[in-house]
Amino acid sequence: QVQLVESGGGLVQPGGSLRLSCAASGIIFSIYRKGWYRQAPGKQRELVAAITSGDKTNYADSVKGRFTISTEYAKNTVYLQMNSLKPEDTAVYYCSAGIGGYDYWGQGTQVTVSS
């Protein structure tokens, strides 16, 4: 069965950094598009960063220049490096892996940016 397991969330001060990881099992990760999404309380889930099977990346305007998505196919893992974090980055972060019209989702990891 397919599993996506996120880790690396936590509490960080404004200006700090975190690296989220998403380890996949049960799929050939390299052929899937991968993405990181987030959902803050009372808001809709939004795309933060995505990477295609050809390693083309795109980012939400709000995180460009601060966040970097990358993959390590040997470990079937996708990362989200988050730098210069702001309080408005506080949310539950989810990873996804999709192919065709179907997406798999992880359970989410909480990121809280606060002093």
Image: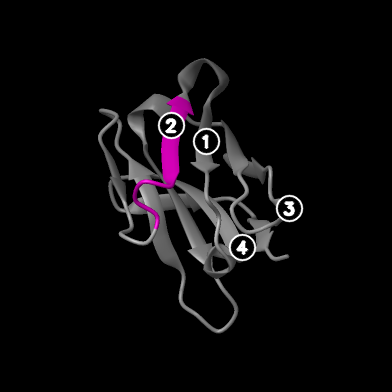
Q: Where is residue 38 shown, x and y percent of the image?
A: 51, 62
Identity, as a three-letter code, of the amino acid under mark 3: Gly
**In the image, which disc is placed on residue 79?**
1
Tell me if I can see residue 1 in this picture: no
> Helix or strand or loop: what does disc 1 sit on?
strand
Query: Which of disc 1 and disc 4 is earlier in sequence?
Result: 1
Where is the N terminus found, in terms of image quarters? top right
Amino acid marked by disc 1: Tyr
Q: Which residue is mark 3?
A: 10
- The residue indicated by pointer 4 is 92
How has the structure been colored for display?
one colour
**Which mark sits nearer the N-terminus, 4 or 2?**
2
Please tell me which residue is depicted at 58% across the width and 39% down the height of the picture: 22
Q: Secondary structure at mark 2?
A: strand
Dot 4 surroundings within 10 Å: few (below 14), some, or many (20 or more)? some
Q: Quadrant of residue 24?
A: top right
Asked if the residue under mark 3 is in contact with the one under mark 4, i.e. CB atoms within 8 Å, the reply is no
Q: Tell whether label 1 touches label 4 (CB within 8 Å).
A: no
Q: Quadrant of residue 111?
A: bottom right
Residue 110: x and y in percent read 68, 59
Q: CA distance from mark 1 to mark 3?
A: 15 Å
> Of the residues under marks 2 and 1, which one precedes in the sequence?
2
Q: Which residue is mark 2?
A: 70
The residue that appears at 43% across and 31% down in the rendered structure is 70
| Whole-number angstrom distance, CA of label 4 to CA of label 3 | 10 Å
Mark 3: which secondary structure? strand
